Amino acid sequence: MILNFFFKHNAYKHIFFDLDRTLWDFEQNMRDALAEIFVNRKLDIAFPDKDTFIECYNRNNHYLWDKYLKGELTKDVLRYKRFDITLKEYGINNKELAKTIGEEYLEIMPLKTALIPGTHEVLEYLAPKYNLHILSNGFKEVQLPKLKRCKIDHYFEWVITSEHSGYHKPDKRAFGYALSKANAKKSESIMVGDDYEVDIMGAKKFGIDQIYFSPKNSKSNSKATFVVERLDEIKKIL
């Protein structure tokens, strides 16, 4: 389903994609990486099963990541703290282990290759017609390796993270930095992302059009320029 559809594709020259959960299947890749760590680190001595470990981590990571985006937590603290809290919840009080696992996670995670269905198809369709870029709040040292491992890095002209710009989406300055690097005008640019507040409302407030990727159609009354439930629906817009 496409909402707010109208023909405007000739106006765009630059498409900025979020990466995690928009193209790269963050949930599946995260679970696979954490399951690997669970086995390698023999965490079954504390956790009843890997699913408990994963869900516990996911909850803590979500809480701390929000603080990171708000500038209340540094990247270095986030990297180990999300594991430190998780381990402590099940009786493992070992900060050094948490730091080690935090580093291992960032080494393993980018090696996972699950993509959102339709990723290759839509990029193959768009690449000859538009300048494609990544605009992500993810860590800079893992985003490009993710793209390379999945063999989709060649589609993108610029891979821009919040660490490059110094600002996190939805901050207008994050979008401003991205457009400046790409030498793109607002009227020629459109943002594609799955996070309504961060990607869509951030882009809208900055002044560029948006495609809200909402697989569960959670925002049918969205204020986004376009709303799609599947990536291949983007081909009907652009």
Image: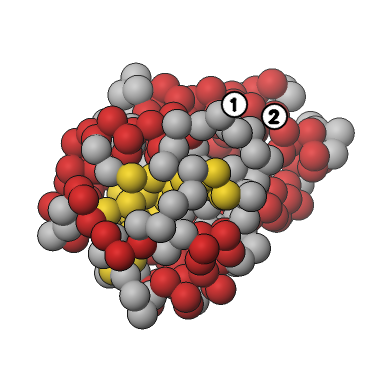
Name which residue type carries label 1: Asn
Name which residue type carries label 2: Cys
Q: Could you say where residue 216 lies in the image, as x and y percent from the top left? A: 68, 40
For label 2, count other residues whose C-alpha is less than 10 Å away and answer few (under 14), some (14-19) or many (20+).
some
Residue found 72% across the figure and 33% down from its top: 55
Q: Say the numbered circle drawn on residue 60.
A: 1
The residue that disc 2 covers is 56
Labels in figure, total:
2
Q: Is the C-beta separation of discs 1 and 2 under 8 Å?
A: yes
Residue found 29% across the figure and 68% down from its top: 131
The answer to whether 168 appears left or right of 218 in the picture is left
Label 1 residue SS: helix
- Above or below: residue 3 compared with residue 181: above
- Above or below: residue 161 compared with residue 124: above
User: Which sits in the foreground, 183 or 49?
Assistant: 183
Residue found 42% across the figure and 63% down from its top: 238
Q: Could you say where residue 27 lies in the image, as x and y percent from the top left? A: 64, 47
Between the C-alphas of marks 1 and 2, the distance is 6 Å
Q: Could you say where residue 107 lies in the image, as x and y percent from the top left? A: 50, 58
Residue found 51% across the figure and 32% down from its top: 222
For label 1, count other residues whose C-alpha is less than 10 Å away and answer few (under 14), some (14-19) or many (20+).
some
User: Which sits in the foreground, 199 or 209?
Assistant: 209
Q: Could you say where residue 84 lies in the image, as x and y percent from the top left? A: 56, 29
